[in-house]
Image: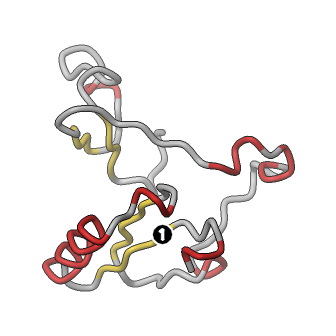
Amino acid sequence: MGADYIDYMITDKISSPPETLERLYSEKVIYMPDSYFVNDYKQACQYVNSAPHLRPSRQSVGLPTDKFIFANFNQLYKIDPSTFTRWMNILKRVPNSVLWLLEYPADAK
């Protein structure tokens, strides 16, 4: 990304082979053990990115400015009780952190 506000890149060794690509990233690279795949249900909607030059602030999306933000934008059906428990254990072990989840569908909230 080359942005000073992005500290880490989460990827896998297929998408970002360490021997050829890691040196090109300004971010610290974190490798997932098997694969990395992210998508966003809003990407299919034209109006979502109508102002791509505007990056929302933490405050504008309801996030604290003084905490480490973990984010998981998977669909609700992928966050079962076991996964949620793991996230809660991570939050307990990382002081001053919060978990940002996708609020889609409405039941997620």
Asked where in the image residue 95 lies, by quadrant, the reply is bottom left
**How many marks on residues?**
1
**Drawn side of residue 62 relative to residue 43, left or right:** left
Q: Residue flagged by tag 1: what amino acid is it? A: Leu
Q: Going 46% across and 59% down the picture, which residue do you hit?
A: 77
- Residue at far left of view: 93
Quadrant of the image occupied by residue 99: bottom left
Q: Is 79 displayed left or right of 73 in the figure?
A: left
Q: Position of residue 69 (x, y in %)?
A: 38, 71
Residue under label 1 = 101
Which quarter shows the C terminus? bottom right
Which one is nearer the viewer's eye here, 3 or 78?
A: 78
Q: Residue at x 59, y 48 (%)?
A: 40
For the residue carrying disc 1, how many other residues have a C-alpha within 10 Å: few (<14), some (14-19), or many (20+)? Answer: some
Q: Position of residue 38 (x, y in %)?
A: 47, 42
- Determine whether 1 is above or below 93 in the image: above
Image position, residue 4 (x, y; %): 44, 53
Q: Is residue 15 above or below residue 107?
A: above
Horizontal side, residue 72 vs residue 46: left or right = left
Q: Position of residue 48 (x, y in %)?
A: 79, 53
Coloration of the structure image: secondary structure
Q: Residue at x 35, y 44 (%)?
A: 9
Q: Helix or strand or loop: what does disc 1 sit on?
A: strand
Residue under the image location 26 percent in, 40 percent down? 29
